[in-house]
Image: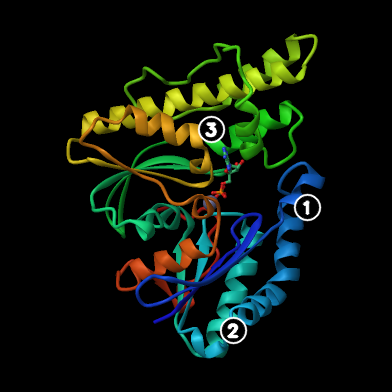
């Protein structure tokens, strides 16, 4: 059974078709990042209109470029939440129309669950595992016991890691979304600035990044010249603070639960090489580390199709008329 995945929860429109074995047949992604850059961030209505404008032609191009026809699609899976309501509505409407016209099943997928499960696509990560999801909208630690059994161990009180990266990048004059460009800039950093490492020594698996971001903002305000080297030093030091915090929380989660001997890092910020290396380097020898390939860390259609592939037989999956946009959808 080939499943078409449709992702539109934020500023990316992703389509992907996977086969009955979970292998990718085709994938296509359109990013509205440039449009967001002009507006200094994600404006929900602007992004939703853009999804609306491009989805039909994106879908046609997806079929044509991969020599696919409607007959190759046997089920449609779509992100139904969490995310921007206007963007979710466009994707859900498109997926519903398509599934009805093809007469095939429609599945609603939780975006966060899809970020976590896609780690199992490249390598068969066995359950249970610890997952750290770090994206633009979410930061959370989960104990994952099965595709449909995820326990939240901790989450951010305020900013998500990706949001903090984007906001610090903006302070340094880097346009939205700044995460990847901030990582590049950090490579030139030489002088370490001791920014706070929020909740580092707290016996809790929760996170908080708004204080760190505010501390960077105060530092930037105070200095007289924000030259290129200073910008790089700030980027480097900020990234080191984030790395120290996530390493500490993963270490604490592993100490608390000896069942957890596998760690997954996923979500857009998992594309960050320094973060990957810091986590991998800190894990005890008997703990294995997994991270999806970079193209599957940031939002994409493959992860939605893959999650449907894993969850299709679960009683928890949303089907047919249950598939509606849920901006605050819990896990
Ligand atoms: O998962 P994602 O594509 O969208 C959400 O579900 O939020 O994550 C996007 C976030 C953005 O904040 C972006 O700046 C960040 O991931 N990001 C990075 C890197 N690549 C993307 N942050 C740090 N380093 C990177 N290399
Ligand atoms: Zn995401």
Marked residue nearer the N-terminal end (3 or 1) = 1
Q: Is residue 132 left or right of residue 301?
A: left
Disc 3 versus disc 1: nearer the observer? 1
Toward the viewer: 230 or 161?
230
Left or right of 206? Residue 163 is right
Instruction: Check residue 93 in the rendering and tell me which mark sits there, or answer none.
Output: none
- The mark that comes first in sequence, 2 or 1, is 1
| Residue 185 visible in image | yes
Q: Is residue 317 left or right of residue 235?
A: left
> Residue sitting at 44 percent across and 82 percent down?
105
In which of the image's four quarters is ligand 1 placed?
top right
Q: Residue at x 39, y 82 (%)?
A: 1
For the point 43% across and 51% down, the residue is 292
CA separation, marks 2 and 1? Answer: 30 Å
For the residues marked 3 and 2, what is the alpha-carbon distance in whole angstroms? 45 Å
* Residue bearing the label numbered 3: 158
Residue 209 in percent (x, y) is at 53, 27
Q: Residue furthest left?
A: 258
What kind of element bears circle 2?
loop
Foreground: 163 or 280?
A: 280
Q: Position of residue 50 (x, y in %)?
A: 75, 63
- Label 1 element class: helix
- For label 3, the crowd category at 10 Å Cα-Cα, with few meaning under 14, some 14 to 19 and many 20 or more, is some
Residue at mark 2: 67
Determine the image quadrant of residue 100: bottom right
Q: Is residue 321 above or below residue 223?
A: below
Q: Residues within 10 Å of mark 1 (few under 14, many from 20)?
A: some
Q: To which residue does mark 1 refer?
A: 35
**Residue 64, percent across and down?**
65, 82
Name the secondary structure under disc 3. Answer: loop
């Amino acid at each position: 059974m080939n499943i078409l995945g449709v992702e539109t929860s934020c500023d990316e429109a992703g389509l992907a078709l996977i086969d009955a074995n979970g292998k990718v047949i085709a994938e296509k992604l359109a990013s509205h990042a440039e449009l967001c850059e002009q507006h200094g961030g994600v404006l929900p209505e602007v992004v939703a209109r853009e999804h609306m404008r491009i989805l039909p032609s994106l879908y046609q191009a997806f079929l044509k470029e991969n020599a696919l026809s409607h007959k190759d699609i046997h089920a449609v899976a779509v992100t139904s939440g969490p995310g921007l309501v206007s963007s979710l509505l466009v994707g859900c409407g498109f997926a519903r129309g398509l599934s009805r016209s093809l007469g095939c099943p429609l599945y609603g997928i939780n975006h966060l669950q899809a970020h976590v499960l896609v780690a199992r696509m490249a390598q068969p990560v066995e359950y249970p595992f610890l997952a750290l999801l770090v994206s633009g909208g979410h930061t959370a630690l989960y104990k994952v016991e099965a595709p449909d059994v995820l326990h939240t161990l901790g989450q951010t009180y305020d900013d998500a890691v990706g949001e903090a990266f984007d906001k610090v990048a903006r302070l340094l004059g880097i346009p939205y979304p700044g995460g990847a460009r901030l990582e590049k800039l950090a490579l030139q950093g030489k002088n370490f600035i001791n920014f706070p490492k929020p909740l580092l020594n707290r016996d809790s698996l929760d996170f908080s990044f708004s204080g760190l971001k505010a501390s960077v903002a105060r530092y930037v305000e105070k200095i007289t010249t924000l030259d290129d080297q200073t910008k790089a030093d700030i980027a480097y030091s900020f990234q080191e603070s984030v790395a120290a915090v996530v390493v500490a929380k993963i270490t604490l989660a592993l100490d608390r639960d000896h069942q957890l001997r596998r760690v997954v890092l996923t979500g857009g910020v998992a594309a960050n090489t320094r973060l990957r290396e810091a986590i991998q380097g800190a894990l005890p020898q008997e703990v294995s580390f997994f991270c999806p390939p970079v193209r599957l860390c940031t939002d994409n259609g493959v992860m939605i199709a893959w999650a449907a592939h894993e969850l299709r037989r679960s009683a928890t999956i949303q089907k047919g008329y249950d598939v509606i946009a849920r901006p605050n959808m819990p896990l």
